Image (tube, rainbow, N blue to C red):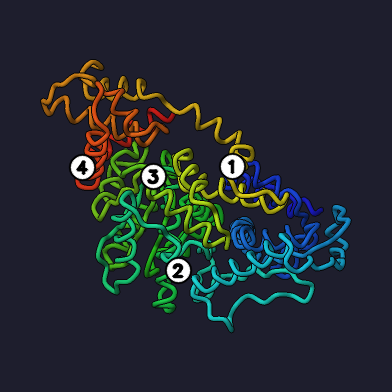
Amino acid sequence: MDAAIAAQWDRVQGQLREEFGDAAFKSWVAPMTVTDVRDGAVTLAVPTRFIRDWVLTHYADRIRALWNGENPAVRTVDVMVVTNMQRPDLTGGGPAAAAVNDPVPGSPRAAAMESGRRTEAAAAGRAGTPASAAAPVPAHGGFMAAAPTGQVDDLSASLDARYTFENFVVGKPNEFAHAAAQRVADSDQVSFNPLFLYGGVGLGKTHLMHAIAHRLRERRPERRVIYMSAEKFMYSFVRALRHQDTISFKEQFRTVDVLMIDDVQFISGKDSTQEEFFHTFNALVDQGRQIVISADKSPNDLEEIGARLRSRMASGLVADIHPTTYELRLGILDAKAEQMGVEVPVKVKEFLAHKITSNARELEGALTRLVAHAQLVGRELSLETAHDVLADLLRAYDRRVTIEEIQKKVAEHFQVRVADMHSARRARAVTRPRQVAMYLSKQLTSRSLPEIGRKFGGRDHTTVMHAVKKVEELIAGDAAFAEDVNLLRRMLES
């Protein structure tokens, strides 16, 4: 394999492993082999049609997007079936695809393949691609993951077709950020400048960024929209400095209609890049151009970002995406199951929603892994299967904090006594921390409401329900309070 291509594929694989986890990587990514890269097309070989169908449904678009980030010349990814695969020499061209028998009609394998086709078609429809413009299927049965339609600047990263507003599951933790993102995407006027989205890993920031870009390109294809990571912005700037071509760099970025920068925390501590971004920011705002930024922290908490830039980023609308609630996690699982075309028992979804609480990405990954295992080995989708297949993941979550740990950490944070968590005192200085501790106990443990109530001085389960509802209302209406609760949660989960 050509060294440059091998290095690109290694980096793409590394990113896929990080995004989807080791189990999914071993099942679906590891079996793939690069057979050819030419004329902007990457050809990947897999050993079976089932793997090909699963890859084209769940990974092909992401592979194309990641490889395009490594090599902008790559525009399509073709997945083909090759039996008795051997690692090819790319300099001699890839092997021809061998014929594979179709699955027996009505078999689990046939059902799984049909489910993959339905999911692919649904994803294409949600992405707003007309049927006549859908990506072509080559004669050998592979899948062409086509580049997004519309006027896409070469600087802009590829958009994930799955990340649209239609596919975003809205709940209390993210409804404000979702509404703000839709306003920016649907408005011809600059409503908030910048729109700053922040939240923890896997909570939906990147999904909303892609959704905004998709909607803008659908509504106003003539507008010039650049979406990219802060890392790519930095590399573009460094390249311009190296080639003494900063004038062209400035012109490219300061003439866009919408500039979207993901994970801006990456430029923390990088003074030259921050300086250039600050001037780009000012130039676009002065021209009335839209800016959308995402980060893992609020602007004021980005300590290694210069004060001027932090102040600028905080001057628009700052929208926090809170950790998921149980109800939102259930909604995410419902949407994922529908997207996959699979009937998942309610008890299994409730079990996953209770157990996997950190972020939506891990939750979806767990369901994908469970469904894939059940289909590949012919097992029933049941609680027993979930316990067996997800044993390693569940062990990590079983190390979840205890109610006693939560009470101790909350008491320290609000400077009250742990004994106040169990007492009958009703002073607000004590009641509010107690309610926060009850809320976190509901979010971070698998204990029932009556069990939680008993841990707080023998209180009734309705008291716990009231506390949870009260804290959710305060989180939605008080940014400072929400930050306190999120800080406590992060400390308890670390």
Q: Nearer the viewer, mark 2 or mark 4?
A: 4
Mark 3 and mark 2 in contact? Answer it, CB < 8 Å: no
SS assignment at label 4: helix
Q: Residue at x 47, y 65 (%)?
A: 248
Q: Is residue 44 above or below residue 355?
A: below
Q: Which mark is residue 214?
A: 2
Dot 4 or dot 3, earlier in sequence: 3
Determine which residue is flagged by label 4: 474
Q: Is residue 272 left or right of residue 315?
A: right
Disc 1 and disc 4: Cα gap in Å? 35 Å
Picture quadrant where residue 484 is located: top left
Q: Residue at x 70, y 75 (%)?
A: 137
* Residue wearing tag 1: 386
Disc 2 to disc 4, how far (Cα)?
A: 33 Å
Residue 146, percent across and down?
62, 71
Q: Quadrant of residue 343?
A: bottom right
Does the rendering let one see residue 408? yes
Asked whether 300 or 132 is in front, the reply is: 132
Q: Amino acid at mark 1?
A: Ala
Q: Mark 2 or mark 4, which has the lower sequence index?
A: 2
Query: Quadrant of residue 119 in the image?
Result: bottom right
Q: Which amino acid does the dot numbered 3 rest on?
A: Tyr
Q: Within 10 Å of the Cα at label 2, are there few (<14), some (14-19), or many (20+) other Cα atoms?
A: many
Residue 454 location (% of width, % of height): 30, 24
Foreground pick, 149 / 26:
26
Q: Which residue is mark 3?
A: 326
The label nearer to you, 1 versus 4, is 1
What kind of element bears circle 2? Answer: helix
Query: Residue 51 location, x and y as percent?
Result: 73, 57
Q: Is residue 263 above or below residue 282?
A: above
Name the kind of residue labelled 2 in the image: His
Q: Alpha carbon of mark 3 to alpha carbon of mark 2: how far?
A: 29 Å
